[in-house]
Amino acid sequence: MRFPNPLTAAARYRDALTDPARADRAVLVSLVAYVVLWTIYATIAKGSQGLHYDMAEVIAWSRDLQFGYLKHPPLAAGIVWLWFSLFPVAEWSYYLLAMAMPAVALWFAWRLSADYLDIEKRVVGIALLTLIPFFNFHALKFNVNTVLIPLWAMTTFWFLRSFETRSRLYAALAGIGAAGCMLGKYWSVFLLAGLALAALIDNRRAVYFRSAAPWITIVSGVIVLAPHVIWLVQHDFAPFGYAMSIHGAKPFGATLISLLGYLGGSVGYIAIPLIIVLVASWPSRAMLADKIWPSEPKRRLAAAAFWGPFLLPMLGAVVSGTEITSLWSMPAWTLLPVLLLSSPKVTLRAIDTRRILIAAVAVPLAMLIAAPAIAVIVHRNGPPPAAAQGRLLAAQIEQNWHQSTPLPLRYVGGDPEIAYSIVAYAYDKPHALPGMPAPSPAQLKQSGMALVCFAEDTNCVSRARAHNPDGGVMTTEIWRYYWGMPGKPQRYNIVIVPPQQ
């Protein structure tokens, strides 16, 4: 059996991607394959560790849809609710949803790049983005950061189109997208501020602000965001208080260190694309200056739209005394290909495109081959027990529950990490109690609840026991087998509070 020559296969692939008649279709097919490969990788490689805490938490939120939550705005929960209305609640389907986020962002990056790059550079730009861990490894953990990846991409695309064309449609879409970003995570205020700043410093701002476009954007955004703002007022802006309690009121030294970590870590995440472009183009000082801050107005607007959302968080951290992390730059890279490649001084050869495509295809294939070994290594090292043992623990809880009542399990409390994991895996699809709007005492009495704690957490066990002092505490020890290998055991204490009619 003869294997195809990688360069020959890459040449054919490049020909399809650079053919104007086939390019969009070829990119869409590539993105579907990209999603499938990384979904399979995640399903195998993460098969020994269960769903991450963040992912289980969003499932818990989705069981109680609100206009906002203690930690974050509601969009991630709404997306998960809709997704699992169509797909089974399973690890593979959750990873499929997670990978859909960067895939959508890559499609919008492809569309956006058409306004700034020739077809050769567009292909290279999208391939380079797939080499950034935010678009695969980190995206596999679905949470409020993952949701921002496509939201920032589409909002940036719609805003730039709106500014350049003053189209009312793009203006309305930009406002809806901006509101969607804020409903994803408040970190998006830096995207909105960055785009607004880009418009204000552009030499063509007078034409833009005399048109209806910016006002349509503002009005459409306010309309979409209004229900959440009302919720914030009614709940005393609880998510802001939570964020400041975790990340705020830090000493200046701690803030400064976090800024250096944010900047250095962010550059580290995009190091591979940076190195590839530097090697391929060998930029002069003039070329670097033209990349960073172009002289041509259209490209300079795109550069401002890139630098603003990326750098403004550093100013915000200094002013507010908060710590920031490079992981939060996850959605900020849509315009990176434009920044790196749009200068006319940058030239790419067909052989460069083919080699970059080989690298982009090789990474997910290599990770797919390595996935079983990764799963075994994680299993041996002992992943977080509540996640790894979540499915087994949920089955144990439901068995204990149905021994005392035929009614479905409706509420799970106790340790939040355990409760969210049980909620994610339990057949009855119960609601979580920790960190969620509390049901009324009458409703809780009528439905009952299961409370679960780590056996060594005496405070949690004492609080759980208080809900049913006469019922006693059940203890179970669970360990998970993976490919015949036993994992680390963990003991749990369970308190069943049966329904009272």
Image (tube, rainbow, N blue to C red):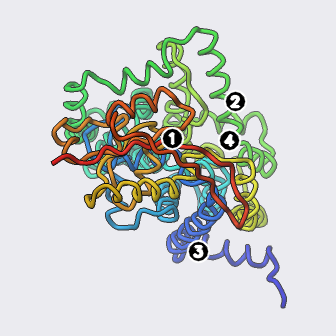
Q: Nearer the viewer, residue 264 or 308?
A: 264
Callout 4 secondary element:
helix
Sequence order check, earlier mark of 3 and 1: 3
- Name the residue located 68 percent from the left edge and 41 percent from the top edge: 269
Badge 2 amino acid: Gly
Residue beneath disc 2: 264
Left-right relation of 449 to 245: left
C-alpha distance separating marks 2 and 4: 9 Å
Amino acid type, callout 1: Ala
Q: Give the mark nearest the N terminus, 2 or 4.
A: 2
The residue nearer to you, when weighing 235 against 394, is 394
**CA neighbours of label 4 inside 10 A, class few (<14), some (14 to 19), many (20+):** some
Q: Which residue is under mark 4?
A: 269
For image coordinates 51% across by 13% down, the residue present is: 321
Q: Which mark is residue 19?
A: 3
What amino acid is labelled 4 in the image? Tyr
Q: Measure the alpha-carbon separation of dots 4 and 1.
A: 21 Å
Residue 341 picture location, percent across and down: 65, 49
- Circle 3 sits in a helix, a strand or a loop, which is it? loop
Does the CB distance between marks 2 and 4 fall below 8 Å?
no
Q: Classify 10 Å Cα crowding around label 2: few (below 14), some (14-19), many (20 and above).
A: few
Quadrant of the image occupied by residue 188: top left
Q: CA distance from mark 2 to mark 1?
A: 23 Å
Q: In the rendering, at what x and y percent does residue 403 appear?
A: 35, 58
Tell me the number on the disc at residue 412: none
Foreground disc of the pair 4, 3: 4
Rendered residue at 37%/23% (across/down) = 240
